[in-house]
Each structure stands twice: as structure tokens, then as C-alpha cells.
Image: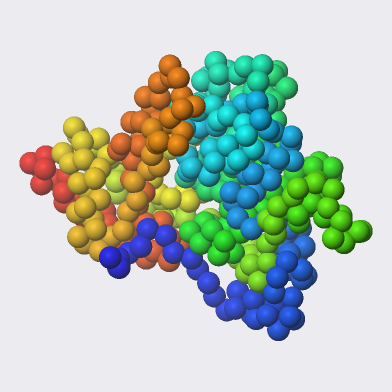
Amino acid sequence: MKFKIPVAEPVIGKRELELVTEAVKSGWVSSKGKFIKEFETKFAEYIGVEYGVAVSNGTAALHLALVTLGIGKGDEVIIPTLTFASVANAVIYTGAKPVFIDSHPDYWCINPNSIEKRVTTRTKAIIVVHLYGHPCDMDRILKIAEENNLYVIEDCAEAHGAEYKGKKVGSFGDISCFSFYGNKIITTGEGGMCLTNDSKLAEKMRFLRDHGMRPERRYWHEVIGFNYRMTNLQAALGVAQLEKINDFIKKKREIAEIYNSQLKNIEGVILPPEMPWAKNVYWMYSILISEENYGLNRDGLMKKLAEKGVETRRFFYPLHMMPPYRKYVKNCTFHVAERLSSCGINLPSSVKLTKDDIEKIIQVISTLNQGRCGR
């Protein structure tokens, strides 16, 4: 089905075309060319980190980070259960075991209180996911990591430019990972990046992303590496997108303000969180639907919106519920994540949205509520 109002949509303009055309004309269309280093440098500067290592996608970034930190067979890595599957997959690729953690009820990200209870002698790292644009509670998590000698990897795929206590996410962990998939705040089509303040980790990541080949001794491989390189074409697109990132985030927050102002008065609609210590960039404008109070469940609302040409997306399924990951779960409960997943809906959030688009969406949500509740 083609929707009149899609849930997400990239903004590609003249500047992107200009730089990608320059890359094409240069002949450097693969993993060599000036735009790769430029994108790495400028994106790292934007986040406030020393080193950037561009890669082929966000999942590759997570896997590369784990391997670089020495995570492997017999290790455990703590991750949230409410996130995209790539987080668990990257852990499993290394031979390590994912340890799932429930969500915090107030801001939906990984719950630090639950992390402390799941640390064992085999735990080597924590992957935090800044879910749907909202930061995790990094002070709490970093304290747990320090007390237990654990690495921290930040998954910032959904939170470019989000802030925790005035500092951008991606600047807290040992390594942070970003995705630039087509629906992200800035895009390179596919693509990702690892950031770090550790020069040795950055050097090792560059080495491993290029087949483990020594740059000073071409075709000499000392370890088994990966082909996780970003192309110059992707990087050119990224450089152009990065020039607009502040405008994109400003528009995302303006869209959220319009949604919030209208939806806050509709019974049964729970607005997305923004804690006092956080700046939410609203990668997705995410709400919860209380069937009891709204009069219609989440799936029913999604169906009605689709009939009006409005695309929506449900929240992620908690990882522990799906077949590939059930074997990693024993004697655990994830009540918050399961509740969020069952009633969470992502509304259209593209920076291309007009005020009329948003008002149309709000009108559908409001009308259904009034009709069901007999107002």
C-alpha cells in the first residue's frame, strides 16, 4: 500500500546531489575518496568525540565495536530487550550471550535498576540503546560499568543529536555506534559509524573493517577481518546531510510540539517521554494507546489510520519473545517492555511533514476517541 503520509521519509536536496555527483566524477566511488575521511571527522566533531570510523551499516558498527573490545565466546553482554534485533544479533555473531534487560517505565530505555541484578563474572559489556530518540540514564549506567569493570557501547542509531545533561549521546561510551539508514535523522542510504576517544580502539576498528589488512603492507592479513567499509558515494551523501542535521532536529522537535499540544488532551493517549535530564530528538514520534481509556486498541488505531492514508509502525517486539532469542532467557520477566510493545505506535515523523498532515493525523485519532468513548 502506498501511503499519502509515510511514517518516515529522507530529505535529499541539491547539496546531496552536488556532492554525490562530485564523488562520481572523481572516479572514487568505492571505499577510497576524500568524503570518507571528511564525514568521519565532521561527524565525530559534531558528537564531541575524537575519532570516527565509517562502516557499511549500523549492525556492522555494533559487531565491529564488540570484536574490537575483545568480546567473544563465553562472555555475556547486557542489552535491552526492547530494541531492534541487530543489537542481539551482533552479540551472537561474536559467540557471546545476550542478557536481556527490561525497560524503564518512565522513559522506555534500558532500566539501570535491572542491569545491576544481571551482572555476573562473565559480563563484559553493556550495550545501551537510546530508544526512539530518547537518551538512556548514562550516569547510572556508567557507574555500574565502572564498579564492575565493564565496557559501555552506545547504540545511537535512533538518536543523532539527542542529549543527556547537555552532552550529546555517543560521547559517553567506550565506543558508540550510529546507523545512517534511509529512515534515520541523517542518512547515507545504508551506512554507519563507530566513534571513540581511544586512538588504539579507532586504529583497531579501521584495521578490522578492511579485512584485517595492514595498510602499510597491502594484501598481508594478520587476522580475520571484515569488509565493513563505507563507500565514498555514501560518505558524500553523509557530508551533505550533516550540514542540515541541526535543522532536521529542530523540525523534529517542532513536529513533536504540535503533536503534544493536541494529543495531550485525548484520553488514553500517552505522550512520548522527555526526562528533565534529556533532550529527545523524536526520531520517531512514539505514543502509547491505553485501550481501556481510549476505547480502541493500538492495532485498531493503526488500521483506521491506514484507511485514511496514514502509515504507522508498531513498537519493536521485545527480543526475548522471538524464536531465535528465547534460549537466552531463563526465569526472567519483562513486564514493562511487553506492555510498551503491545500498545506503542510510531506516528509519521518525517521532517517533510506539513502542519496540515499532522492535523489530519490528530483529527483521526481524536475523532475515533470521541466516537468510542461516547463524548
- Splitting the image into 4 quarters, where does residue 127 fall? top right
Colour scheme: rainbow
Asked if one can make out residue 261 in the rendered structure from this viewpoint, the answer is no
Could you tell me residue 49's position as x and y percent? 75, 46
Could you tell me residue 195's position as x and y percent? 71, 47
| Viewer-nearest residue: 6 or 98 | 98
112, above or below 269, in the image: above
State the residue lying farthest toward the right: 216
Q: Residue at x 31, y 36 (%)?
A: 342
271, above or below 96, in the image: below
State the residue lying farthest toward the bottom: 25
236, above or below 44, in the image: below
> For the C terminus, which image quadrant?
top left
In-image side of 182 versus 25 (left or right): left
Q: Residue at x 58, y 57 (%)?
A: 180
Asked if one can make out residue 198 in the rendered structure from this viewpoint, the answer is yes
Total number of numbered discs in the rendering:
0
In-image side of 299 versus 279 (left or right): left
| Viewer-nearest residue: 321 or 348 | 321
Could you tell me residue 144's position as x and y percent? 65, 21
- Splitting the image into 4 quarters, where does residue 199 fall? top right
56, above or below 373, in the image: below
